[in-house]
Image: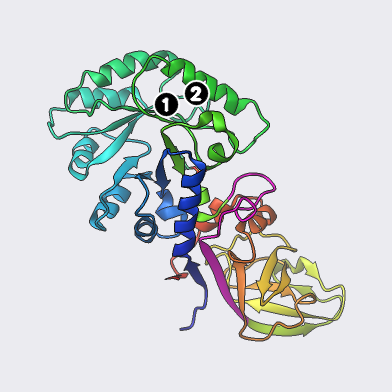
Amino acid sequence: MSRTTVATIHLSALRANLARIRALSHGANIMAVVKADGYGHGLERVARALADADAFGVAAIADGLRLRAAGLRQRIVVLSGPDEAADLAEMRRLQLDAVIHHEAQLQWLEADRDSRPLRVWLKIDTGMHRLGFAPEQVAVVHDRLRALATLHDDIVLMTHFAASDEFDSTTTATQIARFDEVTRHLPGERCLSNSAGLLGWPAARSDWVRAGGLLYGLSVVAGKSGSELGFAPAMTLSSRLIAINRLRQGEKVGYAGTWTCPDDMDVGVISIGYGDGYPRSAASGTPVLIGGEFAYVIGRVSMDLITLDLRQAPSARLGDRAVLWGRGLPAERIADAAGTISYDLTCGMTKRVLFVED
Ligand SMILES: *Cc1c(COP(=O)(O)O)cnc(C)c1O
């Protein structure tokens, strides 16, 4: 095989992370969020590994279709609900739960004559200002939903946090208080927390947790990797060292020569680049793991290749496998160096990367 970039998906890590989320959730149901192709890990593969989840959360009906086609029978929640009236028939056929967040969706439901049952989640905007009904609309919307004969009457009340990864900010506390106030007199299960909410906000404990990042061993908490929070990386991205070149002090490396050798030194070349999803924005100094040693990106990331300072990796040999992130090298370190978050990295793998499971 000529391309050597491999994303190894650790199914045991997915399972262990789900078990840990469950242990932290004090009996809540777990919605495993598998949008964006399971955060880039592969939708069906992730869902099969997480068959113990109580529900799956997806961004689009097409993902629900894929999960049903793969034989999964759990509840599947389409996090943004129907996009048009015609989606309701497809959601009823596939038994996908609909998140209702907008007046237009409510009107499609009220006009719908289809008698097949449908479950709905009522999304409340407590401050994120992305999707959801404003607090003052909620009581009336809830009444209108309850009046619809084909809807299950166990409407789940949900909201989403804008900054739950900031454990010392007041934003989340305000959102929780607003949610409690708005839903005080309404029946039904509650669903508030995402991954960071689960870790940082015990007051948001409720009937359902929507967990994404932590399932994959990823963190959005500043300064903490998934591993430091006790979760195992579910993806290890690796490729191969295909050249080692001895360069002289003062020579420049890569496009535009943005890095100059401070010494006579070995420069390694790995066959991975932004064409695989390795971020072009990864700055000089971004670590790569070769054997037990760290080498560091120097110069620009190209489409197919990156160049490395091998001075601290003297054991590196041609043909060695290098880990770009995953076991031994948290994706959060790469994300920090690239000015993004780890979710963005795993979601960005391209089609030429070979996915394998272990
Ligand atoms: C993506 C998403 C989640 C999961 O968030 P994580 O930070 O990955 O746990 C939960 N709820 C909604 C509405 C989402 O869009």
Query: In the image shown, does 311 or 200 lie closer to the viewer?
Result: 200
Does label 2 point to a residue whose CB lies under 8 Å from ligand 1?
Answer: no
Q: Helix or strand or loop: what does disc 1 sit on?
A: loop
Which mark is drawn over residue 132? 1
Residue at horizontal 48 percent and vertical 83 percent from the top: 2
Up-down relation of residue 40 to residue 99 (above or below): below
Q: In the displayed structure, does residue 70 sit left or right of residue 179?
A: left
In the picture of the structure, the residue carrying the numbered disc 2 is 126
**Residue 190 appearing in the image:** yes
The picture places residue 107, in percent across and down from the top left corner, at 25, 22
Residue 271: horizontal and vertical position, in percent? 58, 76
In this rendered view, identify the residue nearer to me: 81 or 29. 29
Classify residue 318 as left or right of residue 60.
right
Closer to the chain start, of discs 2 and 1, is 2
Q: Are marks 2 and 1 in contact (CB under 8 Å)?
A: yes
- Residue 295 in which image quadrant: bottom right
Mark pair 2, 1: CA separation = 8 Å
Q: Is the CB–ligand 1 distance for label 1 below 8 Å?
A: no
User: Is residue 224 magenta-colored?
Assistant: yes
Give the mark toward the camera: 2 or 1: 2
Using the rendered image of the protein, determine whether residue 82 is visible from the camera's viewpoint.
no
> Quick one: 149 or 136, which is closer to the camera?
149
Label 2 SS: loop
Name the residue: 60% across, 46% down: 220
The amino acid pointed to by label 1 is Gly
